[in-house]
Image: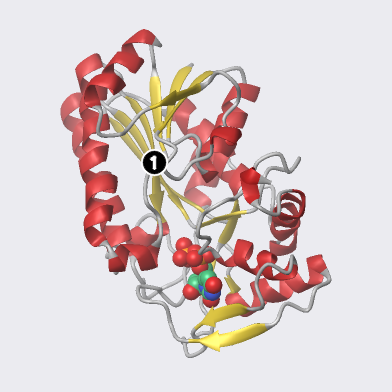
Amino acid sequence: MKVLVVGGAGYVGSHTVRLLLAQGHEVWVYDNLSLGHRESVPAGRLIEGNLTDRALLMQVMRDKEIEAVMHFAAYALVGESVQHPAMYYQNNVIATFELLEAMRAVGVWRFVFSSTTATYGQPETMPISEDTPQNPINPYGFTKLVVERALADYAHAYGFGVAALRYFNASGAASDASIGEDHDPESHLIPIVLQVALGQRPHISIFGTDYPTEDGTCIRDYIHVEDLATAHLAALQKLQPNSVLQMNLGTGVGHSVQQVIEACRKITGHPIPAVIGPRRAGDPACLIADSSKAQRELNWRPKYVSIESIVETAWKWHQSHPRGYSS
Ligand code: UDP
């Protein structure tokens, strides 16, 4: 299939691009490189452009005879979304509508969307299934939920076939360490802990130890970025006009911040000093996926099931790229 990967120079997008190419799809990456990395895009596949440039998007989709769009271009930091909600509504909602309208204008109907566990807020029961009510507790989650709702409407009214994939915590790096996670500034737990192991930071700050969890730190479901990529390809094959797929993507196992730090100590052999800090605004205490729907309907199984195996791939990437793509 001819696939336009919007935000394909970013973390999850770049891993999905690799897999699409490996499986014989014709791939074009559309990215403004504001957060993405040119180095992560295979040669000759990058089209630089903004999500708000509807005319360019239409031209690219026509010229390249695009049959499907995967949309990864979004701001995705909970804390930042609380500080700067306008930025999030502008980019994640308003700019996404330019993309949808460009698709509608040229007749592209297949759409795979990066959604998030943040659309659920803090549910009372774990694990989270697709039937769990979506009540976001931060602007990031709201922006993704708005788009999910719009996609369902576009599917029913305009014949779009959409998949909203609700990621839990994307983590790890390509198994050959050729691409990986590189944010500036970095705010995600695993890369920051590994930067401590590399001697680039003195310690990891734990954001709150007074949550209602066993060790008081937040629990998340860490899912390997290559497993996310596999799910995207499976969802792409499943798209039908006028249909909506909504899937949780996680391992079904939760790890506390303390447990993640412990796993990193084990894999790196570094003591990794930790200091206790205040809670970060917008963080739910516990998020664990029930991914049985994706397992059933996409025939998808995460390959990386232990936190150590995930950290191991991230560690290889950070060791070989201590300054990310500019190493
Ligand atoms: N976290 C932390 N210290 C850090 C970064 C993150 O304690 O320096 C915690 C954060 O509060 C959350 C978990 O680690 O409970 C995962 O955070 P991350 O930013 O990696 O992903 P998120 O869950 O926000 O998508």
Q: Is residue 44 left or right of residue 141?
A: right
Q: Nearer the viewer, residue 42 or 117?
A: 42
Q: Say which residue appears at 59% left-offset and 76% top-offset.
A: 256
Q: Position of residue 176 (x, y in %)?
A: 76, 40
Q: Mark 1 belongs to which amino acid?
A: Ala
Q: Position of residue 123 (x, y in %)?
A: 36, 71
Depicted 248 relative to depicted 308: above or below: above
Q: Position of residue 179 (x, y in %)?
A: 65, 41
Q: Is residue 274 left or right of residue 279?
A: right
Helix, strand or loop for disc 1? loop
State which quadrant residue 135 falls in.
Answer: bottom left
Q: Is residue 246 left or right of residue 14?
A: left
Depicted 34 relative to depicted 205: above or below: above
Q: Say which residue appears at 57% left-offset and 26% top-offset.
A: 20
Q: Say which residue appears at 43% left-offset and 82% top-offset.
A: 279
Hey, which residue is sitting farthest bottom in the picture? 210
Residue pointed to by mark 1 = 73
Q: Is residue 125 left or right of residue 176?
A: left
Residue 301 visible in this rendered orientation of the protein = no
Q: Position of residue 140 (x, y in %)?
A: 32, 59
Q: Say which residue appears at 45% left-offset and 45% top-offset.
A: 35
